[in-house]
Image: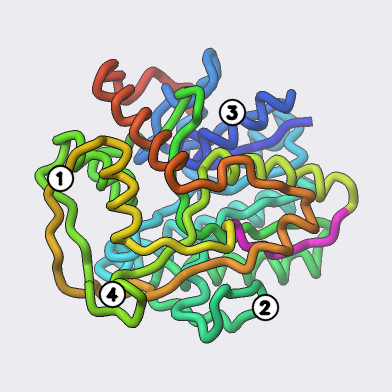
């Protein structure tokens, strides 16, 4: 049986594909390569280029490859962009996910793992925030993901499709073996941007807001290493195969770091200062986002291996230096749909 990974040539998707292959799984990747790279996949694997909303293509892949499970990463992920282009986010994240879920049901797929986000909580009343907390997103991005969660819940109630929703907190770092990492030009991830600024690949890093009600005035985030997150997907697949009931789980460490603390960690890693611009708050940003992370550890028997901010920053820095040294082509090749 095969695992279909949508968006598998992207940042988190490619790390999960490597983890699946390392575990001996048969994997097929569907990606439109709008933000992903064929070079991120284990050689000689190539992605099938296409959109998850193309039900005929997805049905063909399910039948031809005997797809038993889908891990769904494909989607748009930038909060400020979603504020400017809400219909684009509802189209790409919600409507396309609905088409994919329908194709999965029609094709007899048994298990579905969905890439969701802590943005569904908005500004939580209590921190750390647990999975049963109210969901009040502050952006179309968060709403688009929450709508897909709701579709999965209702679909699993009506059909023979079990699912795990993984709500990511702030994902960072890179594969310690440097097989893949965050390569997207103009990426907005805090640690990626800070590392690029420290290496001279950006003129500076902008900090949006220094007057929040936090210890140092900047937003606080729970950073999870991308390799730990990838292993969580493998664990979720094993859980569902063993007969586990559908579940929604936070993916974080339960510890928060402020923007200033992250910048300090990058300075320690590179050994020199870099330009930082302190600016005004940005619409849609959450003040404090820290996971209550006990449920995923208990239900999936998942134990983090890289729960350390300096390690996360160190791996991100190593990947950025790798990109600079090798200047890898952004696209290797791909299989046409």
Q: Which mark is residue 274?
A: 1
Residue position for label 2? 132
- Graded by Cα atoms within 10 Å as few (under 14), some (14 to 19) or many (20 or more), the crowding at tag 3 reads many
Place of residue 277 in the rendered image (x, y in percent of width and height, measured from the top left): 12, 59
Classify residue 142 as left or right of residue 3: left
Q: Residue at x 57, y 54 (%)?
A: 115
Element type where label 3 sits in the image: helix
**Cα distance, mark 1 to mark 3?**
33 Å
Q: Which mark is residue 18?
A: 3
In the picture shown, does residue 18 fall above or below 226?
A: above
Place of residue 114 in the rendered image (x, y in percent of width and height, measured from the top left): 62, 54
- Graded by Cα atoms within 10 Å as few (under 14), some (14 to 19) or many (20 or more), the crowding at tag 2 reads few
Closer to viewer: mark 4 or mark 2: 4
**Cα distance, mark 2 to mark 1?**
41 Å
Closer to viewer: mark 2 or mark 1: 1
Residues tagged 1 and 3 counted as in contact (Cβ below 8 A):
no
**Cα distance, mark 3 to mark 4?**
38 Å
Element type where label 1 sits in the image: loop
Q: Which mark is residue 217?
A: 4
Closer to viewer: mark 1 or mark 3: 1
Element type where label 2 sits in the image: loop
**Cα distance, mark 4 to mark 2?**
28 Å
In front: 103, or 247? 247
Closer to viewer: mark 3 or mark 4: 4
Q: Earlier in the sequence, mark 3 or mark 2?
A: 3
Q: Residue at x 64, y 37 (%)?
A: 4
Element type where label 4 sits in the image: loop
Place of residue 16 in the rendered image (x, y in percent of width and height, measured from the top left): 59, 37
């Amino acid at each position: 049986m095969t695992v279909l990974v949508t968006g598998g040539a992207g940042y988190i998707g490619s790390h999960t594909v490597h983890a699946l292959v390392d575990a001996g799984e048969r994997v097929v990747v569907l990606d439109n390569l709008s933000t992903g790279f064929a070079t991120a996949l284990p050689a000689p694997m190539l992605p099938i280029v296409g959109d998850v909303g193309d039900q005929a293509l997805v049905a063909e892949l399910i039948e031809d490859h005997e797809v038993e499970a889908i891990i769904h990463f494909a989607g748009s992920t930038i909060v400020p962009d979603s504020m400017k282009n809400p219909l684009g986010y509802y189209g790409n994240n919600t409507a396309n996910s609905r088409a994919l879920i329908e194709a999965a049901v029609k094709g007899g797929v048994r298990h579905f793992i969905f890439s969701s986000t802590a943005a569904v909580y908005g500004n939580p009343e209590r921190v750390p925030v647990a999975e049963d907390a109210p969901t009040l997103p502050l952006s179309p991005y968060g709403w688009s993901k929450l709508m897909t969660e709701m579709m999965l819940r209702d679909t699993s109630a009506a059909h023979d499709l079990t699912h795990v929703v993984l709500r990511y907190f702030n994902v960072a770092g890179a594969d310690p073996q440097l097989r893949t990492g965050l390569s997207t030009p103009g990426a907005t991830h805090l640690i990626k941007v800070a590392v690029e600024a420290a290496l001279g690949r950006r003129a500076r890093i902008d900090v949006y807001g220094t007057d929040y009600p936090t210890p140092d005035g900047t937003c606080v985030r729970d950073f999870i290493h991308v390799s730990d997150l990838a292993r969580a997907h493998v664990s979720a697949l094993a859980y569902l195969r063993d007969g586990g009931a559908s579940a929604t789980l936070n993916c974080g460490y339960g510890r928060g770091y402020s923007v200033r603390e992250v910048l300090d960690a990058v300075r320690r890693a590179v050994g020199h200062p870099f330009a930082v611009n302190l600016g005004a708050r940005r619409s849609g940003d959450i003040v404090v986002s820290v996971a209550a992370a006990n449920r995923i550890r208990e239900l999936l028997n998942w134990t983090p291996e890289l729960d350390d901010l300096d390690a996360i920053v160190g791996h991100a820095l190593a990947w950025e230096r790798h990109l600079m040294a090798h200047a890898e082509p952004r696209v290797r090749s791909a299989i046409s749909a």
